[in-house]
Image (cartoon, helix red, strand yellow):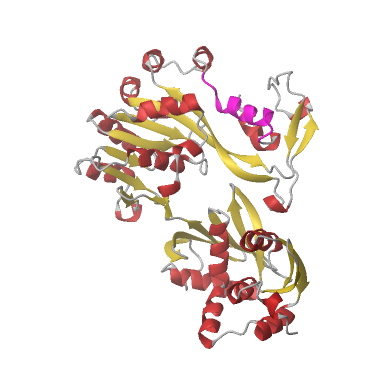
Amino acid sequence: MIIETSLKDIITKELAWHYKIVPSKYDDSSVVLKILESVNIIKVKDELEVILGKDIEFELISELEINKLLTINYRLSTTEISKTSKKNDLLVNIINEAISIGSSDVHFEIFEDEARVRLRIDGVLIEKKSIKKSNYAELVNRIKIQANLDISEKRLPQDGRTKIAGFDIRVSILPTHFGEKIVMRILGQDATNINIDDLGFEPEEKEQYLEAIKKSNGIILISGPTGSGKTTTLYATLKILNEVKRNILTIEDPVEYTLKGINQVQLNEAIGLTFSSALRSFLRQDPDIIMLGEVRDSETAEMAIRASLTGHLVFSTLHTNSAWGTISRLMDMGVPSFLIAETLNISIAQRLVRKLCIHCKKEMDINTKDFPKNYKLPSILKKHSVEVGCEKCHFTGYKGRRAIYELLPIEKDTLEIIKNNKTTIKEYFTEHNIKTLSDKAFSLLRNGETSLNEIYSLLITN
């Protein structure tokens, strides 16, 4: 069971215990590793190939066998044993894995016979781990304690916050039939690496957007459903505007990114800190730029309009389906059309579309019956790509996402449409060559970047 020194030296002690691996044989280009049979082979293979710079093959063995090999060949000191036990912490490992693969949420769920962990990756939940039902209650209590919640309360929903692996995490607990379901939203990410060039704007759209945000006052509204990337777009924008000469204030629910130089406020409705009340206070803080997490009601809309009229640049979001829908929603909230025309710089709708995995996507002939009814399919499209699934994409068929945008700049003729309450905008879009979300989605399909299944709902709204 003792391996040769030359073979043992391929893997450091830290790597061996972290991944539960022991080398079996190797050559110049590849290495065979004995590994615990219950680990996530796909994830570990990708990571180790990067670390070792070799092709990896595995031999699966039991936990008893791997522990014997590790103990004999990579003996730990007492201090190292203590550190390793912390590394083998289930909750920390799950959070670390979620962060490493870019997951936004971790779901802990319990059912009649088992419990499971799912991670939201690229907007879709993927099952990652099962947990013994007997261990689930202990896990729930630990999360509650870390989030300063009441462990004795099992009948009512609870919300809290904690910090794991250096990340702020929002915890939501919901009583279900078989126990408590937990969703952990990973927050506190640094916005330093967010770049507007990486978001998905086409060159002409980027130019229009940058022109709108250069104004010293007015409102920029971004619409889309939850999880469509609105906050990321806003922070990429604030990063551009974040200069010493400007006072930038935000009110968010929750604070998802941190950016040095920006004053961020966390919404807390329980104590009366709402979007509208925060905005009132902001106006006494000598701001240049204000970012509201969301315009939820007529009071907040009115305050945002007032702030823009008094010389401030205001950014916010709305849950609408299109750029024109944002204008209609403001009218429904009771904002006069002349005030919208006076203050709105640009209205943007956006979505996040999953990209097909380049390693496994497959091209197929077009079947018009697969498209939504009444959708005018261009005759030039004869084939399209479909999702398949492989190790590289965790067998989802997709890897990564990109944003698509629908921009409605508020210009002179747009003002007339708004002032006259003309809510039919299709002809205006055609005349001004404005591409809708449906147009953008179809372009991704035509180019083989995404699948029909991914964009079907956007084509319906054409």
* Residue range of the region highlighted in magenta in the rendering: 434-449
Q: Using the image as rendered, state which of residue 124 and residue 115 is in the foreground.
A: 124
Indicate the quadrant where residue 72 lies: bottom right
Q: Answer left or right for 431 relative to 258.
A: right
Residue 93 image offset from top left, x and y in percent:
57, 68
What residue is rendered at 44% in x and 15% in y?
Answer: 422
Image quarter of the N terminus: bottom right
Look at the image and tell me whether residue 322 can be seen: no
Magenta region's main secondary structure? helix
Q: Answer left or right for 243 relative to 59.
A: left
Q: How many marks?
A: 0
Instruction: Determine if the magenta segment contains residue 442.
Output: yes
Residue 85's place in the image compared with 411, above or below, is below
Residue 272 image offset from top left, x and y in percent:
30, 51
Indicate the quadrant where residue 311 lies: top left
Image quarter of the C terminus: top right
Q: Answer left or right for 33 relative to 201.
A: right
Q: Using the image as rendered, state which of residue 77 and residue 344 is in the foreground.
A: 77
Residue 255's place in the image compared with 329, above or below, is below
Residue 44 image offset from top left, x and y in percent:
66, 63
Q: Using the image as rendered, state which of residue 198 and residue 334 is in the foreground.
A: 198
Q: Using the image as rendered, state which of residue 362 and residue 182 is in the foreground.
A: 362
Look at the image and tell me whether residue 239 can be seen: yes
Instruction: Determine if the magenta segment contains residue 424.
Output: no
Residue 380's place in the image compared with 194, above or below, is above
What residue is rendered at 68% in x and 77% in y?
Answer: 8
Residue 95 image offset from top left, x and y in percent:
54, 63
What residue is rendered at 33% in x and 46% in y?
Answer: 251
